[in-house]
């Protein structure tokens, strides 16, 4: 799992909320750093879940997810943001985002959304198959 947010407090809160699970969690402070992480692992499927902020310097969440999809990332994606235009929400839906959560994120809701996303990956036994399932459900899954 990769969590991307330019706000250090938000990253710490995400990490604290999600570390009780038995999953590996990495953090990046902006979209460019996240892209570098995907490039360095030489396999864009290496992360099963991306949790990203929308508004970030250098590379925002929409640009990040678009580039990752073009690189072959088929995992689940969740967006955490203070606000989102209808155009951005539509674009995220087209990119297969499971859910958009508004800041401040309620920890219980975050855990439910993350657990659901990870079950989609676990149920198929592969990130690639989960990505196909995610794409099929994308139109009805985007919520706040």
Image: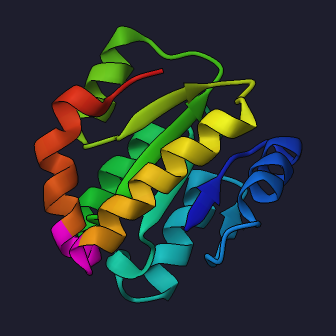
Q: Name the image quarter holding residue 104.
A: top right
Q: Name the image quarter holding residue 121.
A: bottom left
Left or right, 115 with reference to 9: left
- In reply to whether residue 33 is colored magenta, the answer given is no
Left or right, 79 with reference to 97: right
State the extent of the magenta-drawn residues as a range.
124-129
Residue at image location 55% in from the left, 68% down from the top: 1
* Magenta stretch: dominant secondary structure: helix
Q: Position of residue 106 (x, y in %)?
A: 72, 29
Q: Position of residue 42 (x, y in %)?
A: 39, 89
Residue at image location 77% in from the left, 52% down from the top: 17
Question: Compared with residue 68, is residue 61 higher up or lower down, i.e. above or below?
Answer: above
Q: Position of residue 64 (x, y in %)?
A: 44, 50
Does residue 129 appear in this view? yes
Q: What color scheme is it?
A: rainbow
Q: How many marks?
A: 0
Q: Nearer the viewer, residue 102 or 67?
A: 102
> For the view shown, which residue lies furthest in the top direction?
86
Q: Nearer the viewer, residue 75 or 36?
A: 75
Question: Compared with residue 92, is residue 46 higher up or lower down, i.e. above or below?
Answer: below
Does residue 58 appear in this view? no
Left or right, 113 with reference to 72: right
Residue at image location 74% in from the left, 45% down from the top: 6
Q: Nearer the viewer, residue 77 or 126?
A: 126
Q: Nearer the viewer, residue 121 or 73?
A: 121
Residue at image location 32% in from the left, 33% down from the top: 92
Q: Position of residue 134 (x, y in %)?
A: 22, 51
């Amino acid at each position: 799992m990769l969590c991307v947010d330019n706000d250090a407090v938000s990253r710490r809160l995400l990490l604290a909320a999600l570390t009780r699970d038995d999953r590996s969690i990495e953090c990046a402070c902006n979209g460019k750093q996240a892209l570098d992480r995907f490039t360095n692992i030489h396999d864009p499927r290496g992360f099963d879940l991306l949790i990203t902020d929308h508004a970030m310097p250098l590379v925002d969440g929409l640009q990040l997810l678009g580039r990752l999809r073009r690189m072959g990332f088929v995992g689940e994606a969740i967006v955490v943001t203070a606000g989102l235009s209808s155009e951005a929400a539509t674009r995220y839906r087209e990119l297969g985002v499971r859910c958009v959560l508004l800041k401040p994120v309620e920890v219980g809701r975050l855990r439910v959304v993350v657990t659901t996303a990870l079950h989609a990956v676990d149920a198929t036994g592969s990130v690639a198959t989960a990505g196909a399932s995610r794409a099929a459900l994308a139109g009805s899954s985007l919520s706040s």
